C-alpha cells in the first residue's frame, strides 16, 4: 500500500502566524503615541517659541539702546547751548551792560574769568582754558562804547557760533558797538573743525568692528597670534588714517603725533571689544557700543564743544578715550605750542588698562580672544 507523503503545513502555518501575531517593533501607525500629529508639532513649536523669546529680547534691547542714542544726540548735540562756557573778561568790562546782556542771551551759561589784560586772556585761549576774550576797545567816533570780542573757532566752532549769535543779541540790547576778531580761524581743509571728530569715529570703528570680525572669521588664534594680528591692525590701520588725513586731505596735523594718537584709540577700541567678547560672549557688542558710541561720541567734544554739553557728557569728555583723542588732535593741529598732557595721558591710560585687562583675563580663563 502506498502511503501519501504527509503535507507540511507547519512552515506555512508559522509564516501565517508570524504575519498575524504582534511583534515588538515600533508601530508606524499614525495612531501610535509617538507619532501623533500633535506630538510631532510640539517639538518644533518649542524651538520656535524659544527663538521668538530670544528675538523679542534682542529687539527690546536694541530699541532701548537706539532710543538712548537718539535722546543723547538730540539733547546734547542737536541743541547746543552755553553751559558754564569759560570766557575771559578784561578789567571793568565784566560789569558792563554788554556782558550783562550777553549773560542774559546765553541764559547765564557763561563762566566769566577776570583777567588784567587782553594779552592774558589771549594766553588762556592758547592754553585752551577759555573760548573767547571780551575787552573794551574805547569809544567810536559817534561816542558809542566799543566792545571787542575775540573768538577762537579752532577751540570749538560750535562755541564760536553760539557766542557770536549771543553777542549780536547783546549788542542790540546794550547799545554798544561790537568788534569781533577770530584769533584762530579754521583752514579751508577743515572749515567746520570736524576733522578730529571724524578721525576719532573712524579709528574707533576700525578697532572694535575689525575685532568682532576677527573673532568670527579668523579663529582659532592663540593669545600670542592674536597679539600679532591686533598689532598689525593698530599700526597699519592708524597709518592709513593718518596718511589720508595729512597727505591726501591736507588737514593741518603733525604726522607722527597723529599716528600714535590714532594708534592708541584703535588699540583701546580693539582691546575693549576683545575683552568684552571673552567676558560676555555674543553680547559683547552692547558694552562696546555703549562706551564708544553712546557715551564716547556724544561726549567727545568734536561735534559740539564740551562747554556746550550737558552733564554728565561735559565731564565724560575729559575721561573717556574718544574725548581725549579729539582734544589731542585739535591741540596738535591748532595749538601745537601749548598742548596739554592730560588728553595724551588719558589715551595712554585707556590703552594700557584695556590691553592689560585682556591679557590677564585670557590667561586666567586659559583662552584667547578668538578661541
Image (tube, rainbow, N blue to C red):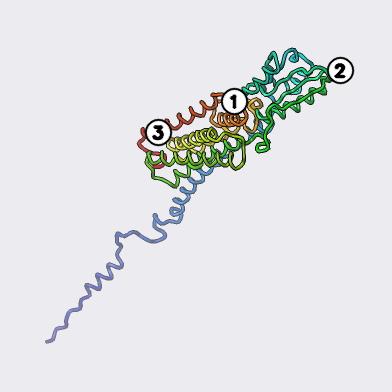
Task: Indicate which disc residue 359 carries.
Answer: 3
Check whether the beta carbons of the residues at disc 2 and disc 1 lie within 8 A of each other: no
Residue 88 percent across, percent down from the top left: 69, 18
Q: Nearer the viewer, residue 299 or 122?
A: 122
Q: Nearer the viewer, residue 325 or 242?
A: 242
Of discs 3 and 2, which sits in the foreground? 2
Examine the rendered structure and indicate whether residue 92 appears above or below residue 238. Answer: above
Q: Nearer the viewer, residue 159 or 275?
A: 159
Whichever of callouts 3 and 2 sits on the residue coming sooner in the sequence is 2
In the rendered image, the quadrant that contains the C terminus is top left
**Quarter of the figure with residue 188:** top right
* Residue 279 visible (yes or no): yes
The residue sitting at the right extreme is 142
Q: Which residue does the image show at 73% across and 26% down from the upper left? A: 163
- Report the Cα–Cα distance between label 3 and label 2: 71 Å
Q: Which residue is mark 2?
A: 143
In the rendered image, the quadrant that contains the N terminus is bottom left
Q: Nearer the viewer, residue 288 or 37?
A: 288
Residue 144 percent across, percent down from the top left: 85, 18
Asked which secondary structure carries label 2, the reply is loop
Whichever of callouts 3 and 1 sits on the residue coming sooner in the sequence is 1
Q: Which residue is mark 1?
A: 337
Asked which secondary structure carries label 1, the reply is helix
Residue 323 percent across, percent down from the top left: 57, 30
Of discs 3 and 1, which sits in the foreground? 1
- Report the Cα–Cα distance between label 2 and label 1: 40 Å
Examine the rendered structure and indicate whether residue 335 appears above or below residue 113. Answer: below
Please tell me how crowded label 2 is: few (under 14), some (14-19), or many (20+) other residues with Cα within 10 Å.
Answer: few
Please tell me how crowded label 3 is: few (under 14), some (14-19), or many (20+) other residues with Cα within 10 Å.
Answer: some
Please tell me how crowded label 1 is: few (under 14), some (14-19), or many (20+) other residues with Cα within 10 Å.
Answer: few
Amino acid at each position: 500500500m502506498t502511503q501519501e507523503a504527509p503535507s507540511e503545513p507547519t512552515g506555512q502555518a508559522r509564516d501565517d502566524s508570524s504575519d498575524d501575531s504582534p511583534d515588538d517593533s515600533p508601530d508606524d501607525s499614525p495612531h501610535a503615541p509617538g507619532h501623533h500629529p500633535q506630538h510631532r508639532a510640539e517639538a518644533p513649536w518649542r524651538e520656535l517659541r524659544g527663538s521668538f523669546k530670544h528675538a523679542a529680547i534682542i529687539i527690546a534691547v536694541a530699541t532701548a539702546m537706539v532710543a538712548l542714542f537718539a535722546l543723547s544726540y538730540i539733547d546734547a548735540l542737536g541743541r547746543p547751548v552755553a553751559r558754564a562756557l569759560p570766557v575771559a573778561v578784561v578789567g571793568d568790562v565784566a560789569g558792563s551792560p554788554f556782558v550783562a546782556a550777553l549773560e542774559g542771551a546765553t541764559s547765564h551759561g557763561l563762566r566769566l574769568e577776570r583777567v588784567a589784560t587782553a594779552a592774558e586772556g589771549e594766553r588762556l585761549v592758547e592754553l585752551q582754558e577759555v573760548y573767547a576774550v571780551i575787552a573794551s576797545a574805547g569809544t567810536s567816533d559817534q561816542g558809542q562804547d566799543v566792545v571787542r570780542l575775540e573768538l577762537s573757532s579752532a577751540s570749538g566752532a560750535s562755541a564760536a557760533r553760539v557766542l557770536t549769535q549771543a553777542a549780536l543779541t547783546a549788542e542790540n540790547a546794550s547799545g554798544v558797538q561790537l568788534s569781533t576778531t577770530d584769533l584762530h580761524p579754521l583752514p579751508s581743509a577743515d572749515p567746520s573743525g570736524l576733522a578730529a571728530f571724524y578721525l576719532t569715529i573712524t579709528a574707533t570703528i576700525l578697532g572694535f568692528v575689525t575685532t568682532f570680525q576677527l573673532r568670527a572669521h579668523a579663529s582659532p588664534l592663540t593669545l600670542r597670534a592674536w597679539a600679532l594680528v591686533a598689532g598689525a591692525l593698530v599700526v597699519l590701520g592708524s597709518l592709513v588714517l593718518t596718511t589720508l588725513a595729512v597727505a591726501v586731505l591736507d588737514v593741518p596735523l603733525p604726522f607722527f603725533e597723529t599716528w600714535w594718537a590714532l594708534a592708541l584709540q584703535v588699540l583701546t577700541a580693539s582691546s575693549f571689544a576683545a575683552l568684552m567678547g571673552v567676558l560676555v560672549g555674543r553680547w559683547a557688542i552692547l558694552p562696546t557700543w555703549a562706551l564708544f558710541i553712546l557715551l564716547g561720541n556724544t561726549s567727545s567734544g568734536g561735534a559740539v564743544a564740551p562747554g556746550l554739553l550737558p552733564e554728565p557728557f561735559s565731564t565724560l569728555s575729559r575721561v573717556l578715550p574718544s574725548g581725549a583723542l579729539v582734544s589731542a588732535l585739535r591741540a596738535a593741529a591748532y595749538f601745537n605750542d601749548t598742548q596739554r598732557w592730560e588728553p595724551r595721558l588719558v589715551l595712554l591710560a585707556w590703552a594700557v588698562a584695556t590691553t592689560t585687562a585682556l591679557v590677564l583675563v585670557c590667561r586666567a580663563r586659559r583662552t584667547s580672544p578668538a578661541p
